[in-house]
Amino acid sequence: MKGHLDGIRVIDLTAYLSGPYCAMNLAAMGAEVIKVERPKTGDPCQWNPPFAGPDGVTISRKDDKDVSLLYLKRNRKKKSIFLNLQSEKGKVILKRLVEKSDIVIENFAPGVMERLGFTYAEFEKINPKIIYCSISGYGQDGPHRDRTAFDLTIQATSGIMGITGFPGGPPTRCGAWIGDLISSYYSMAGILAALVSREKTGHGERIDVSMQDSCFSMILDEALDYHLSIGVPMRTGNRNPRLAPWNAYEAKDGFIVIAVANNAQWEAFLGAIEREDLKGDARFKNPEGRFKNSDSVEEIVNEWIKRYTKEEALKRLREHKVPCDTVPEVAEVLEDPHLKYRGMIQELKHPLYGETGVKTAGFPIRFTRLPGDLSPSAPYPGQHSEEIYEGLLGMRREEMEELKEKEVI
């Protein structure tokens, strides 16, 4: 099936999450993504449990064909080859691949690619149209460039943990791996912009994406510096620093969320809870007043909702078009009929044994003409070596056997 990036070839030198996720989404849109893995060890995520294989899903690796679920999720629709970038012959082969490709993505620590001899200037000489994207914790320059980074450290240093949690409580990590994923999406956006620019200029691009930069850019949508100056707590739990009611509220049988953003929704909310008597209350006449008196607003909501089940409360609120919804647990989200209808809940596949019974997320961008697709499986590590080395690069079988013996490929 063709996609918007049909004919675009990506060399994926990445591991863990931020880089593989970026390359996977390019593959979903039709790019040919060649995942370059170290001989024998491959992507480090390959060794993280649980595993899928001939015996189903297991917590420990029991068979040579077992593949980590993390690997299967993050490398869907890619091709895989083994290549030792430490060897001189391996370096030559990578340069031959760059010559025939459009994009290189790497997420090594800053300086690693340069020490291997793989600078943008070197790649540009080989292929002036190459787009070279580096993803790292703190970027390719600056005082912190050499710090080791993972999702937790990035959520901390970007300020995300500083604004997540409840007042008086500890800084809290967001449950999703947004330290990796936000930078992954920025990388994809940069690559797509570079592809458009290349059509106009004929030149490639060097892209430097910092995980800290990416996440920091997200926290300043709110006027946090101003809120800090007037004493508004940075960690507000599920509350909004400028709107009320905006929280998760406990009904008889569980939680729902209510989000009132303007005066019209506030009046609709008062109608839903049969408290029209509050329409003239000066404390609540505008969003600023409602936030300043948010504790009183919370009391009003909690006093009302404790009399109803979730569905009863939601029915009343929806009848008045008040923004609200359920707060499902993960097991319930995986059965969500709307997500299923949208094709977002798919079954993860093993490249050799097919369906695993494990659910994964589909591709979230809907196109009308050329759909994105993540339903194909990830490759088995090294699965496409013959296709790439013999087919794309024109290697002789004898040469390939020699390189295998020397653990170059």
Image (cartoon, grey):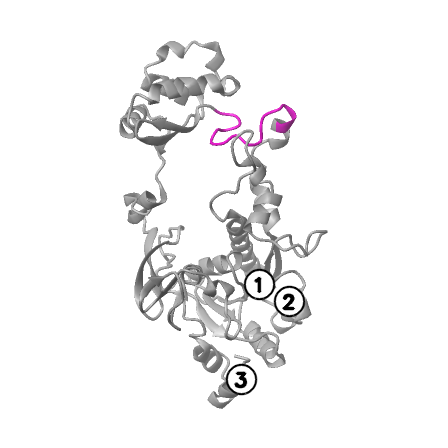
- Assign a secondary structure to mark 3: helix
Query: Which residue is farthest right?
Result: 143
Task: Give the left or right position of residue 85, taking residue 300 as reference.
Answer: right
What stretch of residues is rendered in magenta?
A: 228-243
- Quadrant holding the N terminus: bottom left
Instruction: Residue 85: tell me if it is visible.
Output: yes
Q: Position of residue 8 (x, y in %)?
A: 48, 66
Amino acid on which the number 2 mark rests in the picture: Met
Identify whether 152 is placed above or below 287: below
Residue indicated by mark 1? 106
Crowding around mark 3 (Cα neighbors within 10 Å: few <14, some 14 to 19, many 20+) is some
Residue indicated by mark 2? 113
Residue indicated by mark 3? 403
Q: Position of residue 286 (x, y in %)?
A: 48, 17
Crowding around mark 1 (Cα neighbors within 10 Å: few <14, some 14 to 19, many 20+) is many
Q: Earlier in the sequence, mark 3 or mark 2?
A: 2
- Between 221 and 194, the one nearer to me in the picture: 221
Task: Give the image quarter of residue 226.
Answer: top right
Instruction: Residue 29: tell me if it is visible.
Output: no
Q: Position of residue 229 (x, y in %)?
A: 65, 26
Identify whether 14 is placed above or below 211: below
Identify whether 7 is placed above or below 330: below
Q: CA distance from mark 3 to mark 2?
A: 22 Å
- Tell me whether circle 1 and circle 2 mark residues in contact (CB < 8 Å): yes
- Assign a secondary structure to mark 1: strand
